[in-house]
Image: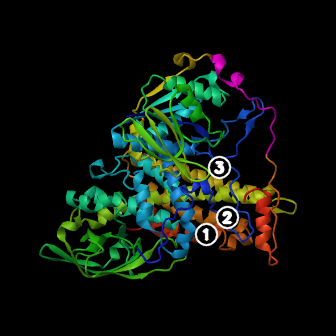
Amino acid sequence: MKIVVCVKQVPDTWSEKKLDPATKTLDRASVDGVMNELDEYAVEEALKIAEATSGEVVVLSMGPEQSTETIRKALSMGADAGIHILDDGLAGSDAVATSLAIAKVIEGRGADLVIFGSESTDARMSVVPAMVAERLGLPQLTFANKVEAPGDGTVKAHRLTDYGYDVVEASTPAVISVVEKINEPRYPSFKGIMAAKKKPVETISLADAGIESASVGLGAAWSEVAEFADAPARAAGTIVTDEGDGGTKIADYLSEQKFI
Amino acid sequence: MGRGTPQLRNKGGRGRRTFVTNARGPPGFQPARPLTRRKVDTSVKFMKFTEEHEQFRKAVRQVVDNDINPYVDDWEEAGIFPAKQVFSKLAEIGALGLEYDPAYGGQGADHSFTLVLGEELGRIDCAGVPMAIAVQAGMATPSLANFGTHELKKQYLEPAMRGELVAAIGVSEPDAGSDVAGIRTKAVRDGDDWVITGRKMWITNGTQADWICLLVRTSDEGGYAGMSQIVVPTATPGFSVGRKIEKMGNRSSDTAELVFDEVRVPVSNTIGEVGRGFQQQMAQFQDERLIGAYMAVASMRKALDKTKDYLQQRNAFGKPLLANQYLQYELAELYAEVDVLEAFCRTCAEAYNNGQDVTRMATVAKLKAGRVQRQVADKCVQFHGGMGYAEEMWPARYFRDSRLTSIGGGADEVMLRVIALLEGMGRK
């Protein structure tokens, strides 16, 4: 089974993130880049399926030069090969453009499964997996917390919903997005890190992928950041004093906020 | 493993998401979350760090951040940590057998990766756990890896590198610590067995160890002669833990006095040559001093960073404490000390990698690490004021833990003696 797992390099969750006032996009230079945490689960799931079916895992990332670090990390976890979609023209791409580039590159590579993390910790839109599935005309099994892909042309997943989960099944090839806790991602080991050095990473430009530069990048984005400001400082919370009616007061508050 | 040992708990998955913070404080105190996470600093490049070194550094950092630091407070309180669980996590990334033979499950790495490991283990929020890890990875196992037979390595080294067996190193005794020649624990040959009698003191991992690399007298020659290293499984009849020692610091690490009462092990458990134990142990001590110094340096930098953050956030007399030039310069001075020591340690690691004799460098590194760490810890406590003296925050623990660097693995005075001898002073 051939599995393409899509990973994104994002700013370290712990670091202070800033927008670049000139481009109104994320300032990626001032912080450490790390693999999007949810993508670690996607890589782990891909590796587990590949190990069980003697398959192959190709890790794909779109992003600036330093995204190779994230590709290397996936390779050191055990992926077999990497694809880096790298082109200055891609800078500022929104989800629509990102899905176009990813779909174009995946197309024709004979992937049985395409696995994503269900969202990135920087943009948090959760739409790229569905868009890629749509563009490729493949079934999508998103928000999965359990995946069974025995390599017989079918894939079954537990798709998380607000009330529990749905059991969904599709024929392969298919697109999957996974949620955290689906597994425990392995750490890259010393041997894995050394082996990753020798694994092939293919770099693909817009021209290589046959993508018109007008259809991607900041200029092609369907949305625009009009203005931005620092998040306001957190206001002091409300303290409810229990005078025998604490429970009711809390329930009233939660109801008011539509939590219950 | 002792009863009541806190186990690794699932604190919301892999730690990162729950934002478990390492700083502690009184009720209502907002823990000093770092202003920004420090980018991996490799500005001092005496070692040639490659991309692989940085990847490995991040892997160790992940284990420390997810599987160790969130639990340190519990382990400190319990006076023990679950060694096998922590070791098996480190084994996953290959951290327990970096320089050992891949034929036995080692990684076949060079010493530069041990340097990276030490630097990252130094970021653990206590000194007890990293010390215990260092014992497993670089203090109790080097002799076995270098001089042990195939069978011994299969039986004891391989599972230790997988984190399945806990190792300890038994040298010090109630009446002999830094003066190794003074040890009295004896192994008497009886057919194909050694029969061991004596006591060992200050044994890290002592209550949880599965086997001990034990230094004993195997002849009556006295002094430095007639010692051997023997692998002693703790399940052997006659072995017992005399007591767990309560210590000023490193409380998460179980330290014990061990009793050997006619403990019978096969002669084939001897590591290397009979009678060469002292020399083998001295070589092993060198590894211990090196990794100890690497960890100490990293811990100092982290302590200074945390103190700097605290002083930035804490206001007094209408401005952040850090606005005081006195405090800035005191910290700057200590950063300078740490920079110099870090550069020295990295140079030392490179020399070791090149096969040079680093006896003197390792001795200097260990001596200076202990001394500078005492200064750093003292200033961290001082600059935190009352909170530095309270057990609720980290500086008190750091102050207690730091004191050991000048005592364990050969006291400062022993390091000075070695340097004096190398300078031709005093008599051998």
The stretch in magenta equals: A213-230
Main secondary structure along the magenta-highlighted residues = loop
User: Residue at the location (82% across, 73% down)?
Assistant: A241
Quarter of the view holding residue B372? bottom right
The local crowd at label 3, few if under 14, some if 14 to 19, many if 20 or more residues have their Cα within 10 Å, is some
Asked if residue B286 can be seen in this view, the reply is no
Q: Residue at x 21, y 56 (%)?
A: B150
SS state under label 3: loop
Is residue A140 shown left or right of residue B237? right
Label 1 marks a residue whose chain is: B
Residue denoted by label 1: B399
Q: Quadrant of residue A8?
A: top right
Helix, strand or loop at label 1? It is helix
Residue A129 placed where, x, y %? 56, 35
Reply yes or no: does residue A215 show up in magenta.
yes
Q: Which amino acid, mark 2?
A: Cys
Rendered residue at 51%/62% (across/down) = B367
- Taking B415 as reference, is B317 left or right? right
What's under tag 3, amino acid-wise?
Answer: Trp
- Magenta span contains residue B381: no
Figure coloring: rainbow
Residue A74, position in %: x, y? 47, 39
Q: Name the disc covering residue A14, or none.
A: 3
Q: Position of residue B26 (x, y in %)?
A: 71, 71
Tag 2 residue: B380
Q: Are marks 1 and 2 in contact (CB under 8 Å)?
A: yes
Identify the element where label 2 is drawn. helix
